[in-house]
Image (cartoon, rainbow, N blue to C red):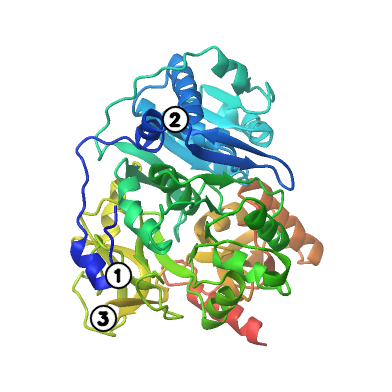
Amino acid sequence: MLPEASTYDELASRFSWDIPDAFNIGTAVCDAWADREPDREALVFAEEGGASTSYTYADLKRRSNRLANLFASRGVAPGDRVGVLLPQTPETAFAHIAALKLGAITIPLFTLFGDEALAYRLGNSGAKVVVTDTGGAAKLEKIRGELPELQTVFCIDGALHGAEHLAPAMADQPETFTPRQTKADDPAIIIYTSGTTGQPKGALHGHRVLLGHLPGVEMSHDFLGQPGDRIWTPADWAWIGGLLDVLMPALYLGVPVVACRFRKFTPEAAFDLLEREKIRNTFLPPTALKMMRQVESPETRWTLNLRSVASGGETLGAELIDWGRKTFGLTINEFYGQTECNMIVSSSSAIMEARPGIMGRAVPGHDVNVVDDKGTILGDDELGNIAVRRPDPVMFLGYWNNPDATQKKFAGDWLLTGDTGMRDREGWIRFVGRDDDVITSSGYRIGPGEIEDCLLKHPAVALAGVVGKPDPQRTEIVKAFIVLKDGVTGSDELAKEIADFVKTRLAAHEYPREISFVDALPMTTTGKVIRRELRDRATRETKA
């Protein structure tokens, strides 16, 4: 989508959107290539430390067609919701592509979600079908009674925990399927995003979201789609960073995607995979980079052939940029966005010098600026809200069944990201901080509200306040300040019990890694926890 250019100004001046009236993500990332180059490599499933299985675009088309027919045979109609509760596996791609071809709406779900997190998302969306594995089927078996609209669960590992075995069910279906002619604005994907209060909100995206991502993806990988490109990310495909920053755009551009289901991410395993699979392009979240940086002299232990490394989620400092140049032989490109409006700011070493500590400039096609709370554009170097003007093809359609929250996301025609920053006279955007309470931990954006709600369900907890505490490796860790019920005494054993309580009900990345028992929480006159004071307290603990 990006034109050739040697400077940012040239790129921006030559770019224009081409969003067709009719567009379907499923056919665009699969059938379009399968019909032209059926034997072109599309997906590689690399077993951890073992063999790899390659899938062509023709393979992708056949399997997604069978699955689309299977979904239809089980009553999935256009507009129905299909949950995909899987890690990086070929079936993850098949399921999303199949549902999208059918005109259904997919819901990517993180495999580490606990019972409550899954029950809320599947119940709120009214999902009719879920595709999962053994672990997911076991969780769903426990909550099926809470989900009256969930009719069918398919398991890729067998007929387990009340789920049907996916492979034989697909085998009986035809290999041909006529995709639905969807509009670019038709709903395609719901990605649940953590906010500061209450339960997560479902960001509903149209099929055009893929086209909206392309300029930022191409820019952050120094014009992705060059001969020999081959991409991998450790970011889970259940999040926008894995699904729409890597998997779908790469398939659209004809770039093979390497999938690997690490049992646990280790820097050594990451370097091994980069070398073994001859990866040319990778999206490495800052936490992964920080872990890999701890490996001694990686440039002498592995032979890498990378062309581009992109990173996003938090600003990289000069040290990580310098380490990347030494280790990878290139400059790491930074990008910025959020679930509701992603890949809107980027750097690109091919056309601009990196400025450590500054995210980059607006990706061509996106009107990004710094505004006040009313949506008035501020002057150069003034602190305000990082915002994006609508309409924009990468912008969400709205929050699922939540028009009030959708309206509050905007100031006039400006979508407020919830982050504060400054813009200099050349248009570089510098991230300063969040004006909400979202916690950034190991690349995940975590809302404290859902954790606080879960904590209050523990029989020992009277009140809870959750904040992010600075951490050198994870950026922040989840910290909980808890007021216990009368007669309950705090202890290390109780803290562990409470942490495990959250871990099993929400997700392994959301549980509080630190718990402090306190006599009282700072509250507003209306009874809201003043998280700012708790954050200040947690920061002081770090410096002590």
The numbered mark, 3 or 1, whose residue comes first in the sequence reads: 1
Q: Residue at x 18, y 73 (%)?
A: 376
Whole-Å distance between the Cαs marked 3 and 1?
17 Å
Amino acid at the residue labelled 2: Pro
Give the answer, above or below, for where 404 lies relative to 133: below
Find disc 3 in the rendering and name its residue. Answer: 426
Q: Nearer the viewer, residue 494 or 329?
A: 329
Provide residue 274's location: percent of width, then percent of height.
Answer: 63, 57
Left or right: 158 as drawn, with respect to 256: right
Q: Nearer the viewer, residue 52 or 420?
A: 52
Amino acid at the residue labelled 3: Glu
Left or right: 106 as drawn, with respect to 450: left
Mark 2 surroundings within 10 Å by alpha-carbon count, few (fewer than 14), some (14 through 19), many (20 or more)? some
The C terminus: image quadrant: bottom right
Mark 1 surroundings within 10 Å by alpha-carbon count, few (fewer than 14), some (14 through 19), many (20 or more)? few
Find disc 1 in the rendering and name its residue. Answer: 6
The numbered mark, 1 or 2, whose residue comes first in the sequence reads: 1
Visible residue check, residue 476? no
Labels 3, 2: front one? 2
What is the number of the mark on residue 38? 2
The numbered mark, 3 or 2, whose residue comes first in the sequence reads: 2
Provide residue 275's location: percent of width, then percent of height.
Answer: 65, 57
Disc 1, SS: loop
Disc 2, SS: loop
Q: Residue at x 32, y 80 (%)?
A: 422
Amino acid at the residue labelled 1: Ser
